[in-house]
Image: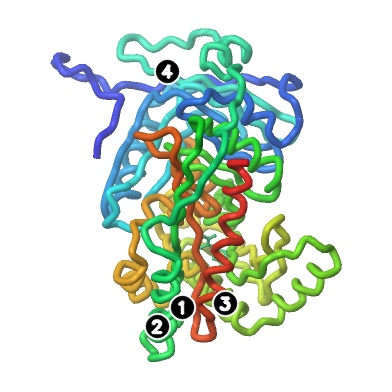
Amino acid sequence: MSSQPAAPSDSPQPRPTALVVRTTALDGILDSDAAALLRLLPPTGPLAWVRRGDGLVAWGEVARIETGGASRFAEAEAAWATMRAHAIVRDDITLPGTGPVAFGSFAFDESSAAGGVLIVPRVVVGRRGDRSWITTITTSDAVPTLSPVPSLADVVARAGGTTPITSPGAVTYVPGAVSDADWIDAVDEAVERIRAGRLDKVVMARDVVAHTTEPIDPRWLLTRLADSYTGCWTFSVDGMVGATPELLVRSEKGLVTSRVLAGTIRRTGGEEADVARAAVLAHSSKDLEEHEYAVTSVAQALEPFCQSLNVPETPFVLHLPNVLHLASDVTGVLCTSSGTAPSSLSLAAALHPTAAVCGTPTPVANELIREIEGMDRARYAGPVGWMGADGDGEWGIALRSASLDPDDPRRLRLFAGCGVVAASDPASELAETEAKLEPMRHALG
Ligand SMILES: C=C(O[C@@H]1C=C(C(=O)O)C=C[C@H]1O)C(=O)O
């Protein structure tokens, strides 16, 4: 693990470097449309978690905690606990997302070199309903002082956020780690293993690589995603961007929520035909089976942390512009007997990987993914989101997403996967991944 800020090395009695955090109201200043927050962002290193115009955008790095392996969540949690314990905070608003905030993104698999990261930004702008705010975070190795918060215009201008958002130009797509034909063979193999009784469900994913004629401005992707996929959480953390419909966990004042998705059908575009397809999906035994595994995995993972849990008996159909999903909102009340509720990140760690992105039983499915999927998922399908000083926060599953290439600004790696059960047909699963790639293809324009 590496983490900053570090205490000065020549200091005989190092005092832990404190975060100095100040939140003040910005009420009435921001535009109200879905992408208004995102337009404040600078082109490099944008941090975002936005849905229906509410959420957080941030930039700059006061601290960066890099972790890896099976302990990637626990290490991040411990480092954040230390930082927030030493933070000097003046928060005029005290809503979720005000005060100290860290954004995070974690690899799907513990063996991935992608590991995990928590980033503590320099500036955060947030909105929740009719409240909006700006938080500035600095460090103080000497005597901490709470300097006045500059105006939003000053801060945005300094971050370069007013630079025009630019198009990536023409886009060409090339196969990722595995060809379509090989991926179909892998799904075939997965179906065989399931039929042989080795497991019930496995999620198989693939990647596609986009090459663009102009450098990719992440704000181009984010604003287009937020405009079109309004019901999804548009995110950007450490080069991972997307608009996920799946909320791994939100914890807020002792209440915990998880939106579980599994079971998918492509939309046709026609209103009437889509209503008919929604009915087909809601009655498809294959999709209901996939969904049941995902809901059970979430309910089982949350149960030890909750004094009560509400698990819907039947899913609803979630309409997205590209697909329809079976969806269940699982809610619970966290146990308070031990005095402190678990943080949102530790809940995310306990939930990950759900059967919506891995399979059932989890260890067998995970092993099969390693054996036959043929690619490193990196941060795709891992938890992505943010956490505040009290540990509350929101973590999505990094789906409908892509990773920017740190070495090539004209290259983007897009990901999509789908649940495979005994009744799966490999060619239809390939078509389903194409439908799930649609948001990022649309984002590129
Ligand atoms: C794996 C993905 O999506 C997941 C798989 C789904 C399915 O198999 O029906 C539906 C939603 C997600 O839980 C993805 O979008 O890449």
Label 2 CA crowd tier, 10 Å (few <14, some 14–19, many 20+): many
Q: Residue at x 71, y 36 (%)?
A: 34
Reading the image, the residue beneath label 4 is: 138
In this rendering, position of residue 190 left or right of residue 278: left
Q: Tag 4: residue type?
A: Thr
Q: Position of residue 327 (x, y in %)?
A: 65, 66
Q: Which element carries disc 4, helix, strand or loop?
A: strand
Ranked by sequence position, the earlier of labels 3 and 4 is 4
| Quadrant in which ligand 1 is drawn | bottom right
Residues at marks 3 and 1 touching, judged by CB atoms closer than 8 Å: no
Label 3 CA crowd tier, 10 Å (few <14, some 14–19, many 20+): many
Ranked by sequence position, the earlier of labels 2 and 4 is 4
Residues at marks 2 and 1 touching, judged by CB atoms closer than 8 Å: yes
Does residue 292 appear in this view? yes
Q: Tell me the distance, in whole angstroms, between the alpha carbons under discs 3 and 4.
A: 46 Å
Q: Position of residue 45 (x, y in %)?
A: 45, 29
Q: Residue at x 28, y 32 (%)?
A: 3
Q: Which element carries disc 2, helix, strand or loop?
A: loop
Reading the image, the residue beneath label 2 is: 199
Colouring convention used in this rendered image of the protein = rainbow
Residues at marks 3 and 2 touching, judged by CB atoms closer than 8 Å: no
Front tag of 3 and 2? 2
Query: Residue 292 — which label?
Result: 3
Where, quadrant-wise, is the N terminus in this rendering? Answer: top left
Query: Residue 201 — which label?
Result: 1
Q: Residue at x 36, y 15 (%)?
A: 140
Name above or below for residue 182 compared with residue 159. Answer: below
* Towards the viewer: 113 or 207: 207
